[in-house]
Amino acid sequence: MAHSTSSERFLTIATDAVEDGFEVFPLIPRGKIPYAGSHGHLDATAQVSRWRSVESNANLGLRMPEGFVCLDEDKRGALRAVGLPLPPTREVRSRRGRHLYYRLPPLSELGDRRLRGKVDGHSEIDVKSRSGFTVGPGSVHASGYVYRLVRGVPLGEVPTLPAEWLPRITRSATQEELSGERTQVGQKATRHHPRRLGQLMRTKSEGTRRDFLRWAACEVHRNYSGDDLRVALAELEAGAIAAGLDQPDIAGLLTWATGQFSIEGTK
């Protein structure tokens, strides 16, 4: 980690996390709570410059891409007590335990199963995914303990969680959940999940990226509003950065799309 003055501390630890594959957002100093007025992990972004005005002693919130999971041990030794294999991976040491990051098997292998909030039978181990967040290394606990990165593996290189763990971290979807998802699909036949276009953005090859970003930015304005719009734009921006577009170019295209949509809305 690069040396920094106290005024640069948050930006430094946030930049390190983004380079390792995370989206980031600030938490209150010595706490796990997002700042008042924020949208918490929904504000997470790979564009660290967004947080230049955040106070230097803010803690760091991390949001993972889809397809990853963190086993968050709240009591030291709880993970070993499960008695299942865990390959070495990215590890952050917390005051009472550790955070271990893994890749999930493809969604097709999970079928109609959903992630639990905790490991089945082990209330001291939280299961964290993109729908939540973890506290990043360099953050300071209320006790003064500093979260430490003890094994610095980027997300792109973490191993897949062993299959033996899946029954412990997943559950069968309820009929209400399945019915709700089917209803959503019917209501949004031409409208994907708000993160979908951002995920597609990451796959675009050189020569197609700008055109896709221009089209996708207009699509999210046409199809989403409120929190969904904000999530879709943030994911699209992160996808464009990951795809290799320059940030000024991305900002210009997103601003252009906002203007185009505003014009359409007045017709």
Image (tube, grey):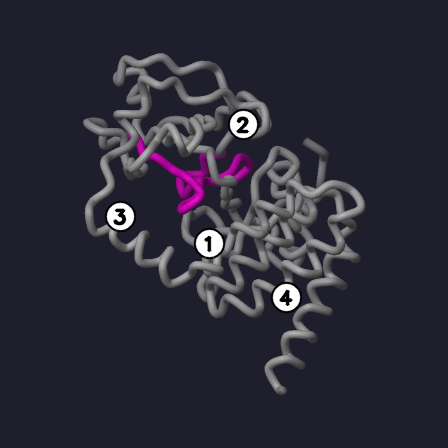
Give above or below for 114 relative to 51: above
Judging by the rendered image, the residue that carries numbered circle 4 is 218
Instruction: Label 1, secondary structure: give it.
Output: loop
Q: CA distance from mark 1 to mark 4?
A: 15 Å
Q: Position of residue 85 (x, y in %)?
A: 36, 12
Does the image show residue 110?
A: yes
Magenta span: chief secondary structure: loop
Point out residue 91 in the picture as x, y percentages from the top left corner. Answer: 49, 24
Q: Relative to 256, say whether 130 is above or below.
A: above
Q: Determine crowd level at label 1: few under 14, some 14-19, many 20+ residues with C-alpha closer than 10 A.
A: some
Q: State the residue at coordinates (40%, 45%).
A: 132
* Contact, mark 3 vs mark 1 (Cβ under 8 Å): no
* Residue type at the position of mark 2: Leu
Look at mark 1 in the image and give the residue it sits on.
193
CB within 8 Å, label 1 to label 2: no
Label 3 belongs to which residue? 178
> Residue 142 colored magenta?
yes
Q: Residue at x 44, y 40 (%)?
A: 134
Residue 149 percent across, percent down from the top left: 54, 27
Dot 4, crowdedness within 10 Å: few (<14), some or many (≥20)?
Answer: some
Q: Nearer the viewer, residue 233 or 223?
A: 223
- Point out the frontmost of discs 4 and 2: 4
**Tag of residue 149:** 2
The amino acid type found where label 3 is placed reads Leu
> If the image is split into quadrants, where does the C terminus sit?
bottom right
